[in-house]
Image (cartoon, rainbow, N blue to C red):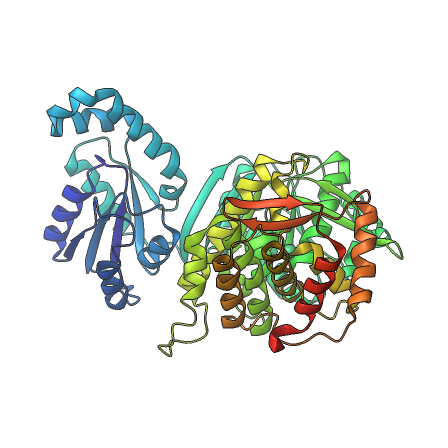
Amino acid sequence: MEIVLVGAPGSGGRVVGQLLAERHGGQFVDLSGTPDRSADRLSGLRRAGEPDTGPALRRIIAADRVLADPGVRARLYRSRRVIWLDVPVDRLLERLRAASPRSREIDGGVDLRLADHLADFTPYYFAGSRVDATGSIAETIATIESLMAKPAESGTLILRADIHGGLLELGEGILARSLDHVVGRLSARRCVVVTTARHRVRADGVASEVRDRSGLPVDVLELPEGEPAKRLVEQERLLQSLARLRLERGDPLIAVGDDVLLEAVTFAAAVYLRGVPFVTVPVTTLGLIDTSIGGKGGVDLPGVGRNLLGAIHQPVASILDIDMARDEPVEERHAALAEAIKYGLIGDDALLALLETSPPGDGQGPWPGPSELLEIVERCALAKRRLVLADERDTTGVRMALNLGHTLSHALEAATGYRLRHGEAVAYGLRAALWIGHAIGVTPAPIENRAERLLRRLELATAPLDVSVDDVLTYVDLDKKRLGGRLRWVLVGIEGVTVRDDVPETTVRAAVARALAGTAT
Ligand SMILES: [Zn+2]
């Protein structure tokens, strides 16, 4: 067994870790005060830290400030037991003052820094088993030893962020414990799981976990595969079933499926009884990094357009378990990475850097592997959460940033008769937006070149598309009419994204032609 002790500065990880290592004959590694990404030490640990489920303590790692970085957490937590040493702020301050009397001079500063630190990082600490560490060292050690004697919870939880916009749980193999935690917080009398035939096995697994752990009655309902799930007639059928099952205001819908299913269930949850709680359990990479966050529900009007009816209704929880997407076709996962590039360009340089390291080339299996995928999902999900919460009703324009690459992608999907995967269409759309941005002096050449290299590296938007510029522009025009006549392009500037509605038609035509040509140009 390997243990990671996490906690705020002053929570005692170093002393507790050292003593535990001595008592049990394990190795002690001190990462306290180490800056994020002290890569040499961490990568050394990763190699050595192969799964070790034996009862004996092999290694104990104390960490405090390294935990904001999802990549560090993903590597450090996998196949280890994570214990959060919980100490209230006032006790932490007492300890810090006693340890370093000189800090009294900058008292207010220490208070503030520590309060900031805790406010920023508490969501990350929640991922571990919580141990009360306010008592003596001996008491803390005794509590940890009693935990060590119990079987470990399965899977690796790297994020449990209980913030406005729904609880976010992220990890690998965490489904059972997350469902337990999520459903336990609701005052539900029954649950309904909604899925499609393709993901029925996963959904039945979810249903029996909830049934076993909570004892609540659980039913599983199906919507059709793909876009038909978003027809009004299918929605009516689903809503009728919910009424027959007498689902009430506090009873949750649990959506288990791909991005289309999540949008369809979001809509149903928003309108049934004017809103019931719902939980998203995505089973695709696109769902993990994008669709399960933000609360956008959509329904189509056949013959008129997609998502013309909609509702914004935030999930009570999103369970982002990368294991749920393990059977996803490689191309599907790959296409979804276009959305990750989007989040990188919106303002996460570390995410772009991570995507640029792909594939590792060390023959360790397909890229991204679990650690990288966990990091990608957390970075995208938290970025989306930030943008969505800054503009929850989609009115101030902040949320527009999420449409980077999407002005063209919707038109491309329609023009190709929905043969293109959403992520693939976004990749072509990103290329067009970057080219337009460069052409009208918004996007600096180094940014455009970097993104273009990344698209090629991930083999996105490489094939030429067999549709005409005019066809695509017809669909772009339909979108424009919906938006009141002005076509808005989200472009990448030096200071982040900007929205422009004055792009000349000739520039748009040239950009679309270039995007459609793939990498042949
Ligand atoms: Zn998208």
Does residue 321 appear to the left or right of 265 in the view shown?
A: left
The percent position of residue 299, horizontal first and vertical second, equals 79, 50
The percent position of residue 359, horizontal first and vertical second, equals 43, 72
Does residue 58 appear to the left or right of 374 in the view shown?
A: left
Q: Residue at x 81, y 50 (%)?
A: 235
Q: Residue at x 69, y 60 (%)?
A: 409
**Residue 221 seen anywhere in this rendered image of the structure:** yes
The percent position of residue 429, horizontal first and vertical second, equals 65, 61
Give the residue at the far right of this rendering.
303
Of residues 337 and 158, the one drawn nearer to the viewer in this rendering: 337
The quarter of the rendering in which ligand 1 is drawn is bottom right
The percent position of residue 242, horizontal first and vertical second, equals 76, 46
Q: Residue at x 10, y 52 (%)?
A: 22
Does residue 181 appear to the left or right of 308 in the view shown?
A: left
Of residues 233 and 34, the one drawn nearer to the viewer in this rendering: 34
The tally of labels here is 0
Q: Residue at x 41, y 54 (%)?
A: 350
**Displayed quadrant of residue 483:** top right
**Residue 307 seen anywhere in this rendered image of the structure:** no
**Quarter in which the N terminus is drawn:** bottom left
**Quarter in which the C terminus is drawn:** bottom right
